[in-house]
Image (cartoon, rainbow, N blue to C red):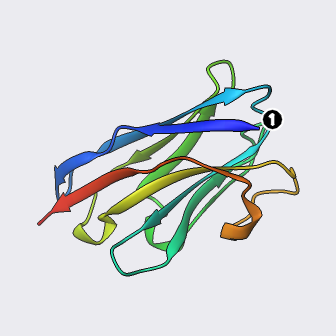
Amino acid sequence: QVHLVESGGGLVQAGGSLRLSCAASGRTFRYTMGWFRQAPGKERDFVAAISWSGASTSYEDSVKGRFTISRDNAKNTVYLQMNSLKPEDTAVYYCAADANLLGVRHVRGAYDYWGQGTQVTVSS
């Protein structure tokens, strides 16, 4: 079992940056970690994921080159650095943990634990 708490969301102008954090508490942090987002009226979609070691990462096409996922296992924290933000990045961003360690996966159903979400709003 792991408890995930996101922070760092807010309101930013287009072209700006934000860094989201996800702090995990529990017996272990040995999970693949992912970030998903959900805009109003839309599905919760994959954004980025990182393996337990940090050696493997994956990104949704629209964020490649703009977002960077990283983790600090000593702090049980995963980050999402978001640069060159666009209005279409506006969404609630969720942190998630995949306990199966079967590689970096994009499917929402692969993730076992979820945070409560943090709102990111990008104004034009």
On the rendered structure, is 96 left or right of 15? right
Query: Residue at coordinates 45% horizontally, 59% vertically from top-left?
Result: 65
The x, y position of residue 20, in whole percent, is: 41, 41
Q: Is residue 99 left or right of residue 79?
A: right
Q: Work out whether residue 68 or residue 93 is closer to the camera in this orientation and state it.
A: 93
Q: Which residue is mark 1?
A: 30
Question: The C terminus lies in which quarter of the figure?
Answer: bottom left
Residue 76 visible in the displayed image: yes
Extreme residue in the top direction: 74
Quadrant in which residue 15 is drawn: bottom left
Closest to the observer: 43 or 58?
43
Residue 53 placement (x, y as % from top left): 78, 36
Horizontal side of residue 50 vs 1, given as left or right: left
Residue lying at 18% horizontally and 50% vertically, measured from the top left = 12
Question: 10 Å neighbourhood of mark 1: few (<14), some, or many (≥20)?
Answer: some
The residue at the point 45 percent across, 72 percent down is 62
Q: Work out whether residue 29 or residue 123 is closer to the camera in this orientation and state it.
A: 29
Residue 86: horizontal and vertical position, in percent?
25, 65
Residue at x 72%, y 58% (from the top left corner): 111
Is 122 on the left-hand or right-hand side of 107? left
Asked if 22 appears above or below 11 in the picture, the reply is: above
Q: Secondary structure at mark 1?
A: loop
- Residue 100 in percent (x, y) is at 87, 52
Q: The disc labelled 1 sits on which kind of residue?
A: Arg
Whether residue 84 is visible, yes or no, is no
Count every numbered label the image shows and give the total.
Answer: 1
